[in-house]
Amino acid sequence: MANTVTDISLNDGNTIPQLGFGVYQIEPKDTAEAVGRALEIGYRHIDTAEMYGNEAEVGEAVRASGLDRGDVFVTSKLNNGFHRPEDARRAFESTLAALKMDYVDLFLIHWPLPTRYDGDFVSTWKALEEFQRDGRARSIGVSNFQVPHLERLAAEADVVPAVNQVEVHPYLTNEQVRAYGREHNILTEAWSPIAQGRVLDDPTVVDVAEQVGRTPAQVVLRWHVQRGDIVFPKSTTPKRIEENFQLFDFTLDDTAMERISGLDKGEAGRTGPNPDEFDYIPA
């Protein structure tokens, strides 16, 4: 099996590389170097966000890579403080300015914030629909949306999100949200794919890794891939950046997949905030 990243079709006709490189919690001063290394290794999908504070450095790395802009899939996300449509428009313009790009491949509402803005994330979504219509966002989607949030968009908006980026890993398989996505042709992107490292010492994961001759991280990331989700591990260590890319030249059998899926702890396994309650807005 060749170690080539699979491209997956989105519901709007575009495609997205199934494996990407995440830059959450990478300091701006370290971002350009890390992204540059990822691009050298072969990653062609970079996931950033306004709230990460490193959009400019992502754009810098893409330009320095010598790759054509069209060969790199770039995602960013709307800052929680800018959900009102006029604010969202200004924030999106700031994202493009920071990246020094004419468009992003994917732009997401970062959090639904159902207890903020009178619970109105629909008007925010309609602003994103504008960005897609004018071509500055090739695809649009959401992040951390629960099933009721997605159902409300389906009832009140015109465009179905291309993706929903949510916390998913063996300790939180998030099956209800993933099932809704499958039913409505919304791809799932898995953030915190190794539960911030918590699953790597799990005896089941370690045992599977020993059986297939791979690292625990590779095994968990391969589990995500075989489930059909999009994943973007984050590291600033060159060796790990490269190891995380080596996912497409081996497979896990059904028994291994079932063993890892069986580690699900439901809500008790969540490492991040619950989207129904999270209301953080940066100062």
Image (tube, rainbow, N blue to C red):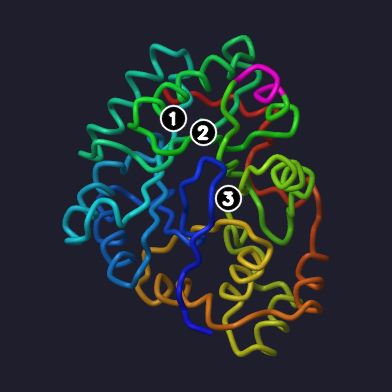
Q: Return the residue nearer the eye: 71 or 223.
A: 71
Left or right of residue 165, residue 240 in this image? left
Residue in the picture at 31% in, 61% down: 34
Vertical position of residue 5 compared to residue 249: above or below = above
Q: Which residues are magenta?
A: 152-157
Q: Quadrant of the N terminus?
A: bottom right
Residue 223 found in image quarter: bottom right
Query: Alpha-carbon distance for marks 2 and 1?
Result: 5 Å
Q: Amino acid at mark 2?
A: His
Secondary structure mostly seen in magenta is: helix
Indicate the quadrant containing the C terminus: top left, top right, bottom left or bottom right: top left
Instruction: Name the residue that disc number 2 marks.
Output: 110
Callout 1 amino acid: Leu
- The tag earlier along the polypeptide, 3 or 2, is 2
Q: Residue at coordinates 58% horizontally, 22% vertically from top-left?
A: 158
Image marks 2 and 1: residues in contact by CB distance under 8 Å: yes
| Relative to 273, residue 15 above or below | below
- Indicate yes or no whether the magenta region holds residue 243: no
Please state the horizontal and vertical placement of residue 72, each as a whole percent of the image.
Answer: 32, 55
In the image: residue 62, left or right of residue 214? left
